[in-house]
Image (tube, helix red, strand yellow):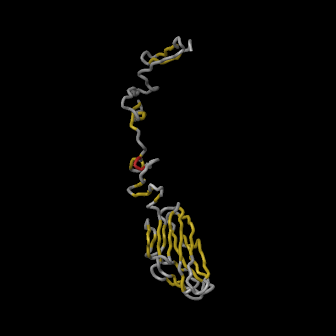
């Protein structure tokens, strides 16, 4: 508006100058050789600086243009690990050379390094009466992180903590009518879950148990069998008959 004015600092003469409005009420100030307060060597040439950022120099006495870069991620630049927001191609993500995520164009997600195993009994195993017996799962269908010991302790030891889906099926023969036959899951040497089926004759019986267990890194899981008849029962070997599986789900 007429009569208004602006105070501007003149760095050459080192004084404040009153800049009045024009008669039409507008105010125009042409700024040249602009410096940031108390900083020297302020950039004032912007040609070729598109897309760059401005930062204080390491000497803390001025500003400089720098190319924008993503923060480091481990020993690599972060950008190779970034996933696209939109793509028509399959997505694969790697960490330290290991593929940890795959997304197909159908939207199906794969976690190729996620812990998981499937094991089974390769030789029939005797289960005496009223005795808790560890099932000697000695054959492996798959074991992604090599966490199941099928030669000595017949147990799964978690590499990473989390929630695991645990399942087992035991095929008993030589059963006695009216008696119970158990499948059990042990964690760190103690029973945590069990399921019992009662025999309805002398036919085979197949107790099945599925549950979710919280494990910390280093915790281990074992499978046990039990039966309360007065005679010895037998677990039938085979990948489709007596098996156990453990998969990390969270």
Relative to residue 154, is residue 46 depicted above or below? above
Q: Position of residue 21 (x, y in %)?
A: 52, 14
Q: Specify whether residue 61 is in view.
A: no
User: In screen coordinates, is 222 left or right of 177?
Assistant: left
Total numbered labels: 0
Query: Could you say which is closer to the camera, residue 206 or residue 61?
Result: 206
Q: Position of residue 227 (x, y in %)?
A: 58, 82
Residue at figure coordinates x 54%, y 63% from the top left: 163
Query: Could you say which is closer to the camera, residue 29 or residue 62?
Result: 29
Relative to residue 182, is residue 221 depicted above or below? above
Residue situated furthest bottom in the rendering? 231
Relative to residue 152, is residue 249 depicted above or below? above
Residue situated furthest left in the rendering? 48
Residue at figure coordinates x 44%, y 68% from the top left: 143
Residue at figure coordinates x 54%, y 84% from the top left: 173
Quadrant showing the N terminus = top right
Q: Specify whether residue 27 is in view.
A: yes
Q: Position of residue 37 (x, y in %)?
A: 46, 26
Q: Position of residue 31 (x, y in %)?
A: 44, 20
Residue situated furthest right in the rendering? 178
């Amino acid at each position: 508006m007429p009569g208004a004015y602006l105070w501007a600092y003149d760095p050459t003469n080192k004084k404040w100058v009153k800049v009045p409005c024009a008669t039409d009420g507008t105010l125009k100030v042409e700024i040249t050789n602009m410096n940031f307060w108390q900083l020297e060597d302020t950039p004032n040439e912007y040609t070729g600086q598109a897309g760059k950022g401005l930062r204080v120099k390491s000497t803390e006495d001025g500003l400089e243009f720098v190319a924008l870069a993503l923060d480091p991620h481990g020993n690599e630049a972060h950008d190779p690990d970034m996933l696209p927001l939109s793509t028509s191609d399959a997505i694969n993500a790697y960490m330290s050379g290991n593929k940890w995520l795959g997304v197909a164009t159908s939207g199906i997600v794969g976690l190729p390094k996620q812990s998981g195993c499937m094991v089974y009994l390769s030789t029939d195993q005797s289960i005496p009466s009223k005795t808790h017996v560890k099932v000697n799962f000695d054959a492996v269908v798959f074991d992604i992180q090599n966490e199941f010991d099928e030669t000595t302790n017949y147990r799964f030891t978690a590499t990473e903590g989390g929630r695991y889906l645990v399942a087992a099926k035991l095929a008993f023969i030589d059963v006695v009518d009216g008696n119970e036959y158990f499948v059990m899951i042990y964690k760190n040497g103690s029973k945590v879950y069990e399921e019992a089926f009662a025999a309805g004759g002398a036919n085979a019986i197949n107790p099945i148990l599925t549950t979710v267990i919280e494990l910390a890194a280093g915790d281990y899981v074992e499978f046990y069998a039990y039966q309360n008849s007065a005679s010895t029962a037998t677990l039938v070997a085979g990948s489709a008959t007596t098996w156990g599986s453990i998969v990390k789900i969270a």
